[in-house]
Amino acid sequence: MELEQNSDLTLPLFYFDENLHSRDIESPDLLLHVTLSEELLTQLCQNPAQDSSVAITLTDYRVDVISADYQSLIDTEHDAQLTLVRGPLLSAMLSTEGEHSFVSPQVDMMPTFDLGDDIEDSEEEE
C-alpha cells in the first residue's frame, strides 16, 4: 500500500458478526475514506513492538454505504479508528452509537523497494 500525503486511503468495512469469516472480501458493507494528513502519516509510520498495537482515532473521515442494510446504523453517531500491529499491518474499525461494529481486513503496509533487478536481468539477456 502506498501512503502519500493528501492522498485518500480507502478501506473496506464489514459488519462484525458470526458470519464475518465467510464474507466475500470483494463485497464490503461500507467504505471508509480518510485523507492522509501529515500528522496521520507520521502516526502511520510506526511499527509497534511484538504483541502490541497502536490505535489512531480518526476525526476526519467519510463513510460510503455499499449495503443499504446498514444505512440506518451509519445515520447515527459513529467513531472510527485505525489500528497498527507489528508488520506493520493496518486495519480499521467503525463503531456506531448502538454498539455495532464494522471492521476491515488487515492491510500490509511494508514499503516496497525497486532494487533494479529487472533492469539487470534484461541487460544480461542481451
Image: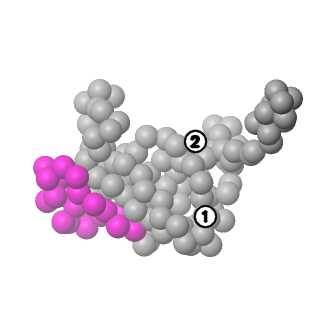
Residue 41: x %, y % from top left: 62, 65
Q: Quadrant of residue 71?
A: bottom left
Q: What residue type is disc 1 on?
A: Glu
Camera-side residue of 103 and 55: 103
Question: Horizontal placement of 84 versus 21: left or right?
Answer: right
Question: Horizontal placement of 5 versus 115: left or right?
Answer: left
Q: In which quarter of the image is residue 19?
A: top left
Image quarter of the C terminus: top right
Under circle 2, the secondary element is: strand
Residue 86: x %, y % from top left: 64, 41
Magenta segment: does it hold 106?
no
What span is colored magenta in the figure?
61-80
Q: In this view, does 111 lie above or below 19?
A: below
The residue pinned by badge 1 equals 4
x 22%, y 61%: residue: 74
Camera-side residue of 51 and 62: 62
* Dot in front, 1 or 2: 1
Camera-side residue of 81 and 42: 42
The residue pinned by badge 2 equals 108
Q: What residue type is disc 2 on?
A: Asp
Q: Can residue 85 be seen in this view?
A: no
x 44%, y 71%: residue: 59
x 37%, y 58%: residue: 32
Magenta segment: does it hold 73?
yes
